[in-house]
Image (tube, rainbow, N blue to C red):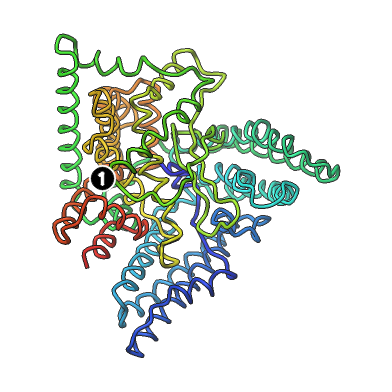
Amino acid sequence: MIIMQNRLSLRRHHVVTTCIFALIVTACSVVSDDAADVRSAESFRAFEEQFFKAEFEYSPLSASSAGLHEYDTRIDDFSAAAYRARITALRDFGQQLERLLDGELSSDDRIDAEALELRIAGELHDLGTLRSWQQDPMQYAGVPGDAIGSLMNRDYAPAETRLRSMVTRMQRLPSVFEAAKNNLDSPPAILVEIAADMSRGTREFIDRSVSAWVTASEIDDTDLLQDYEAAAAELSSAADAFADWLVQDLLPRSRLDFALGEEAFLKKLYYQDMLSISLDELLAIGERQLQKDYAALIDIAREISPDRDPLEVINALKEDFPDPENLLSTIEDSINEARDFVIDNAIATVPSEVIPIIAETPVYARDGSFASMDTPGAFETLATEAYYYVTPTEPEWTPQHVKEHLSLFNPYTVAMINVHEAFPGHFLQFLYAQEFPTLTRKLVESPMNAEGWAHYTEEMMTEQGFNAHDPRFRMSQLTEALIRDVRYVAGVRMHTKGMTVEEAADMFETKSFLSPANALAEAERGAWDPTYLYYTYGKLEIQKLAQDYQEKYGASLKDFHDAFVRVGPLPLPLVRRALLN
């Protein structure tokens, strides 16, 4: 997953700064021999600039994440008035864009315009219909980690400069909790419980991660350090108080039902990924894929060991796992195997010698995450490193919980995680980000594109012979596929068919062979990430696109992969249009 992907609900949006706008817009404007076409292109690019400028004013936190550090001391306004003003602004932008779409636009500009049209409609659906700002406490609980972590994690300025910005943000962050208390209105209980855990994690994040960073930075400004200690203590107390308020005040008046319902669920899918399909057809596709992958996994288990129960063979994979202290080195020792295979077998062009930095997942981002890729913002110019995060065990876990967690990092699964997160998955797609030709393609991301691509690469690499010498790697690939298949079916059923979290957890145990602790974590994720079917559905769509592209152009698989990652992470129907004209 892409972090904080698996934190899709916690960031508002990426944005772009005015100092870059003029350069980007000039470079990306489409020039035509026809004067009317030129005017249309200029009008759309002017709109694009205006839209993203307004977005970064609305969300300075996302501006910093995008690499725009002149906004590092600011935080978002989470008041009800700010949300209502945003709804009004989005409606106005939507009307402007509708007029542009009625005019003459080049095919590339029309693709970008339709991507922005979806973006606007999706955010209006989220704020106006779903009312996430009133129904999702997680989006408030996750703010301190993102606000501080985005300044701390990358060395884009001297540590003292970054700490000053962090202190200013820390002093302002308690206002987020006050806004949450005013805004939240009978949200789903499961989201309240997760948000409380996240908010309690803020103190741990400050005490462990932030304090360690401050100490290692060896800052000698006594006044600044005192300001930091005071701000950190105040923020920790505010986060603890917010967690208490969530449990003691909000939880008793929360509702058990978390389901979106069929209409809202399908609209969310369309606005997020341009997926237009009936619910019955959507569910049938997921269930067929689940049955197909389940049967294939059972077959290969019997092939490996005909005399043993298939479940025993599958579970045997998980017995070879690293000690907690060796978890990161396990990834470090194996990541180049995937990279070398991509290069040696002409899977895709790898345009850089750089590999991601492997580190522990930040404390505030560990809920529901086992491994993730955190890449720099689209306009980061100095601290351009990417982080491959791996979630460690926790001191308070029982020995059984530790074992269940580490079992996912057996060598066979790690090989697939490396493919998904790094080569040729998320990290390779990031390496092409500088080539994305427009603001929209740099800043609009479809989960079905990004996660679909990463999941597609797992099966594709296996089919191309990655670790073909040992069928246990193919078994691991199918096990990973089954987890995504169950996400697909469980997400649809939880939000449209009345499936409970407990029933979803049971499905993860019986159909994708997860341990109870991991199965429950996956099921709970479905409550706050309802459309996490984007892994499997995106994979299937990219497989179709790869076949159509190769047939149309007589291209190699490598040709398709290079073309795909250069387009940018737009919704897949728009990528299809861009690649197939």
* Residue 67 vs residue 514, the one in the foreground: 67
Q: Is residue 52 above or below residue 560?
A: below
Q: Position of residue 181 (x, y in %)?
A: 59, 46
Using the image as rendered, state which of residue 361 and residue 169 is in the foreground: 361
Residue occupying the point 54% across, 32% down: 360
Tell me if mark 1 has few (under 14), some (14-19) or many (20+) residues whose alpha carbon lies within 10 angstroms of its own: many
Tag 1, which secondary structure? helix
Q: Quadrant of the N terminus?
A: top left
Residue found at the far right of this picture: 222
User: In the image, 404: left or right of 225?
Assistant: left
Q: Position of residue 532 (x, y in %)?
A: 33, 42
- Which residue is labeled 1 in the image? 539
Expressed as whole percent of the image width and height from the top left, the position of residue 299 reads: 14, 23
Residue beneath the point at 54% across and 34% down: 359
Tell me the amino acid under the disc marked 1. Lys
Left or right: residue 257 versus residue 390 is: left
